[in-house]
Image (cartoon, grey):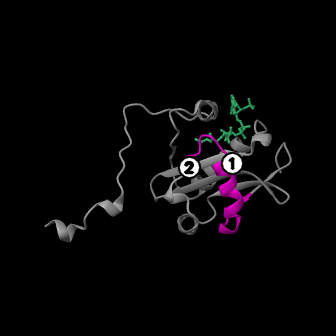
């Protein structure tokens, strides 16, 4: 139990519909095809127990997706119900996730924050996360790349 009365538990796919509603109304959470039910089910299966919810009874107050590739971890979609913000829920979700990652032997964790998300940036800095300079994120859709055997 935390200083405000909430609990933290793993996110299961049964929670998906409620969580999606929270993501949709949360500025700072950018949704894509990777957030469809099947994709989230795959993500949760691949990273068992790492993604978390903050709950109060049956209500979901906060969400955090967390996964790693055996080398680095990544957090996504930290979101807290507007009426429950500034009560330590975001901080508690992140601290629990980092503890779980550390137990799994993962040394470092990243999070992507939209340029426009000033509150998000303030939050991460307050928690001691360092904004990175000298790096740019490059992305590509895997499906757009021809298989190697068709390229040679
Ligand atoms: C960012 C967010 C998850 C923070 O959740 P939260 O539960 O309110 O955060 P916490 O209560 O744990 O705050 C921890 C600290 O972060 C800072 N902080 C959080 N929200 C802040 C705000 N609106 N303004 C200034 N500082 C803020 C404070 O220093 C706070 O500590 P304090 O309340 O003791 O001063 C929440 O505002 C949210 O859901 N925003 C919309 C979605 C989003 O942007 N997610 C981040 C994606 S990268």
Q: Nearer the viewer, residue 144 or 49?
A: 144
Q: Mark 2 — residue?
A: 75
Q: Nearer the viewer, residue 44 or 37?
A: 37
Whether residue 76 can be seen here: yes
How far across and how far down the image is residue 22, in percent? 69, 51
Ligand 1 lies under 8 Å from the Cβ of mark 1: yes
What's the magenta region? Answer: 9-30
Q: Nearer the viewer, residue 38 or 11?
A: 38
Residue 76, compared with residue 69, is above or below; it is above
Labels 1 and 2: the sequence-earlier one: 2
Query: Does residue 143 appear to the left or right of 35 in the view shown?
Result: left
Q: Nearer the viewer, residue 26 or 57?
A: 26
Ligand 1 lies under 8 Å from the Cβ of mark 2: yes
Which quarter of the image is occupied by the C terminus?
A: bottom left
In the drawing, what numbered circle is on residue 14? none
Residue 21 included in the magenta stretch of the image: yes
Q: Are marks 1 and 2 in contact (CB under 8 Å)?
A: no
What crowding class fits label 2: few (fewer than 14 Cα within 10 Å), some (14-19), or many (20 or more)? some
Query: Does residue 137 appear to the left or right of 12 in the view shown?
Result: left
Instruction: Kindly identify the residue that appears in the image at 75 percent across and 41 percent down.
Output: 82
Q: Mark 1 — residue?
A: 93
How far across and how far down the image is residue 40, in percent? 57, 63
Tag 2, which secondary structure? Answer: strand
């Amino acid at each position: 139990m935390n200083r405000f009365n909430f609990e933290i538990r793993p996110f299961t796919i049964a929670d998906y519909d409620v969580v999606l509603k929270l993501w949709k109304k949360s500025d700072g959470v950018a949704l894509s095809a990777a957030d469809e039910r099947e994709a989230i089910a795959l993500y949760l299966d691949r990273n068992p127990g790492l993604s978390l919810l903050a709950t109060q009874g049956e209500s979901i107050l906060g969400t955090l997706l967390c996964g790693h590739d055996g080398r680095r971890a990544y957090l996504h979609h930290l979101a807290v119900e507007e009426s429950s913000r500034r009560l330590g829920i975001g901080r508690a979700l992140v601290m629990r996730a980092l503890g779980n990652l550390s137990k799994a032997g993962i040394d470092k964790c990243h999070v992507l924050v939209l340029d426009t998300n000033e509150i998000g940036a303030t939050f991460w800095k307050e928690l001691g996360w360092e904004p990175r300079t000298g790096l740019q994120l490059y992305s590509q859709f895997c499906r757009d790349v021809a298989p190697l055997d068709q390229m040679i």
